[in-house]
Amino acid sequence: MSLGTNISRLRAEHHLSQGDLAEALAVSRQSVSKWETDSSVPDLDKLVKLSQVFDVTLDELVTGTGPQPKAETPPQQVVVSHRMPGRKIAGTILFCMGFLAFLIPTVLGGLLTGLLLAVPFLVCGIICFLARRRPGLWCAWALYLIADIFFHYATGLNWTYIFATFSWEQMGLTSVYVVTAWIQVLVTLALLIATVRSFRKFPFPLTRRNRVILALVWAGFLVSRLPFAYLVLPLGAYVLSIGALMALVSIAQGIVSMILLAIALTLAVRMFAAWRASRR
């Protein structure tokens, strides 16, 4: 398989056009076309940048094959395991714990308490069964959003109380509100950092299309922070009570905005990493 064929194949696998690849490498589209038709060969520095954009080694880029196993290594018999994956075992345990968390309070007369206690276990159990990759990260996000909704609407705690760190007494608050707000902010930052690190190998080169995608995600995040509860209030006032409608819209808005923020930060960091790699 020729070098040009490998470049064309890898470009297609990364869903890049010839123009996108040319922009990421700071060359003309005609140069990329000549490489793919084997009319010319890229310089060494361009080969290095190509391997970084495609996240492959130079050997894989040039020959189209990965590192070969050692000749003296005897072939090993493939053993097919029929054991249940660890994430499904964890999901089954979480379902059982959710059932117990619902059953015990319900028997004691607290149906609502049972539902509230069972929801986190059931949500994480579903995630473990559906998410093939990073189930722990998605469970952490789900638990964070559930806790945020509960504390916000059940106790009135909110991360914005960090701005009252030095004036909580004058505002009639207790220190618990401020401490909880700072804990929420720190947990949010930890989840965002964990999300970015989890996708540290995700290819997102600096192309025109990727810049548009990143701009749209950031725009969606900013739009999601608008006070939609007041905009849709006249539309649903006849269906739900004002308080219930505003609560539902605020919950949905908070979840969407956090998801968009995590995606925007992850893509921005990966694009910056791709840009730094192309400048070396």
Image: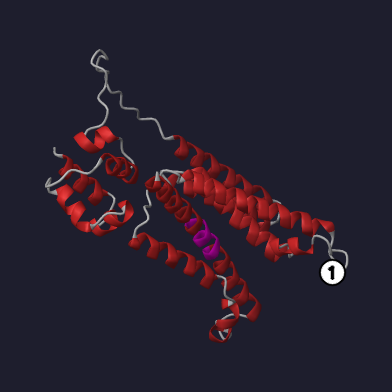
Q: Is residue 215 above or below residue 8?
A: below
> Which residue in the structure is indicated by mark 1?
171
Q: Amino acid at mark 1?
A: Met
Secondary element type, mark 1 = loop
Q: Residue at x 52, y 43 (%)?
A: 136
Query: x, y percentage for residue 242?
Result: 64, 81
Q: Residue at x 45, y 44 (%)?
A: 200
Q: Is residue 202 magenta?
A: no
Asked whether the viewer can see residue 122, the reply is no
Q: Nearer the viewer, residue 251 or 72?
A: 72
Asked whether the viewer can see residue 123, the reply is yes
Q: Nearer the viewer, residue 37 or 213?
A: 37
In this rendering, would 147 be left or right of 68? Answer: right
Query: x, y percentage for residue 18?
Result: 23, 56
Q: How many marks?
A: 1
Q: Residue at x 38, y 65 (%)?
A: 212
Number of residues whose C-alpha sits closer than 10 Å to that of mark 1, classed few (under 14), some (14–19) or many (20 or more): few
Query: x, y percentage for residue 24?
Result: 33, 53
The residue stretch that appears in magenta: 256-263
Q: Is residue 261 magenta?
A: yes
Q: Is residue 127 above or below residue 163?
A: above
Query: x, y percentage for residue 72?
Result: 25, 12
Scheme of image coloration: secondary structure
| Magenta segment main secondary structure | helix
In this rendering, would 165 be left or right of 6? Answer: right
Instruction: Assign the N terminus to one quadrant of the image.
Output: top left
Instruction: Assign the C terminus to one quadrant of the image.
Output: top left
In this rendering, would 187 be left or right of 259? Answer: right
